[in-house]
Amino acid sequence: MSKVVVVGGGWAGCAAAYMAAKKGCQVDLMERTDMLLGTGLVGGIMRNNGRYTATEESISLGIGNLFKVIDDHCLHTNIEFPGHKHASLYNVAIMEPVIKKVLLDAGVAIHLQTCINDVEVVNGKIKQIQSADKRTFSGDVFIDTTGTAGPIKNCTKHGNGCAMCVLRCQSFGGRVSLTDKAGVKEMIGVRPDGSMGAMSGSCKLFKESLAPHVVEELDHNGVVVISVPRDQINTDKLSAKACQQYASQDYAENIILLNTGHAKLMSPCYPLELLRLIPGMENARFEDPYAGGIGNSMRYFGMAPRDDALKVEGVDNLYCAGEKAGLLVGHTEAIVTGSLAGLNAARFTADMEPVIFPDTLSVGSAVTYVRKEMQTEEGKLKKYTFSGAVLFEHMKEFGLYTTDLGEIKSRVEKTGLQEVIAERI
């Protein structure tokens, strides 16, 4: 049986591992912490704007099983908040064990608290990798889904210091890039002011610390919007966000909370003493140990040069997905690219031609568009997501955004990829 090794257990890594396993490969999934999903442990937003189209395309293509599982565990569906329509919010408190069971049932071998710190490359191919505790793992093909956030030195140098985010570098060590360890020079994202990286876009509050009427509205509607005092309006913070779809004026002039099991505050950080001046937030408290009053994790410090099949340039048997594949923001984007990487890794082991999504689909347009944009200096300044900013505008410009399920199904059928993806390996 062919062996696929996935390094990084976020949404992209889970999707890659699941897809490779479903195609008949033996799969090892490495995760340096004690839980899967990565930033998906504190995210929870699905199907907003163009993510709806990408999700339904994936389901129609036959790579959308994880999206169906997420849909079954949402707290709210078809909600709206500033700049976003038909969104779903999943419960971050229970999603990780649900996905872990799905992977185990698919036959994926999950290795938690396994940080890969050494890579052996022979004749342009990865032969084996080694963990910090000296265990070795060999495979026919490898997938890098280690992300781009942290480690602490990057947050300290380019952000507001370690904000003790969900990546938990202090407990499990910082991110280690498989691509970098294999000798490939990675790309770094920049902000408009020339500084490196970008700050994660939201904080987490204990619901119990909010006023009862705020909690009631949050639980019932899934969203609460509260105006902030005029002297607290700060538009400068918007440019620092990785999630530029949440960088509109609405997010400077209001406190926007989403119910994802906890109260998700749509701001990269918010000084606690100022937050408590807002009606309903007088006793607000960030979830421990997050230092959401001073900052958030820094991302986009290590992206792999790759082609549209998500194969990493310079290593014959290495693929990538998620943020490792470019300036792509979000769970949907990670699952789409993870599924494609897992599919093509499995096909690689059988000497089959890789699948490339055409630009007649939003999922294909995104993979190609982001790759091309990142090759330009201007493109490196931007962040890309199906749910807003430049990629969503690109989708609308080319008529790719739709919520019409019949149109999506027809669009996918015209590609002929359903049969290709369904092929046995």
Image (tube, rainbow, N blue to C red):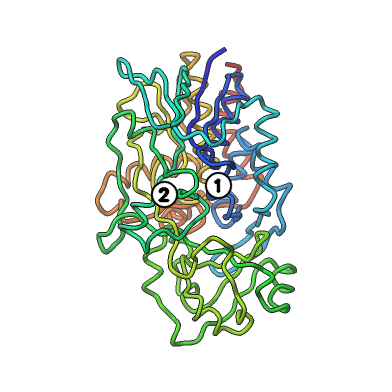
Q: Quadrant of residue 309?
A: top left
Closest to the camera, between mark 2 and mark 1, is 2
Amino acid of disc 1: Thr
Residue at 36 percent of width and 42 percent of height: 303
Residue marked by disc 1: 332
Kind of residue indicated by mark 2: Ala
Residue occupied by mark 2: 149
Viewer-proximal residue among 243 and 128: 128
Vertical comparison of 400 with 258: above or below: above
Label 2: few (<14), some (14–19) or many (≥20) C-alpha neighbours in 10 Å: many
* Viewer-nearest residue: 125 or 281: 281
**Residue 117 sits above or below residue 154 on the image:** above
Picture coordinates of residue 9, whole percent (x, y): 54, 38
Horizontal arrangement in the rendering, residue 231 relative to residue 74 (left or right): left
Residue at 53% across, 67% down: 266
Q: Position of residue 420 (x, y in %)?
A: 56, 23
The residues tagged by marks 2 and 1 sit, at their Cα atoms, a distance apart of: 18 Å
Per the image, label 1 sits on a secondary structure element best described as helix
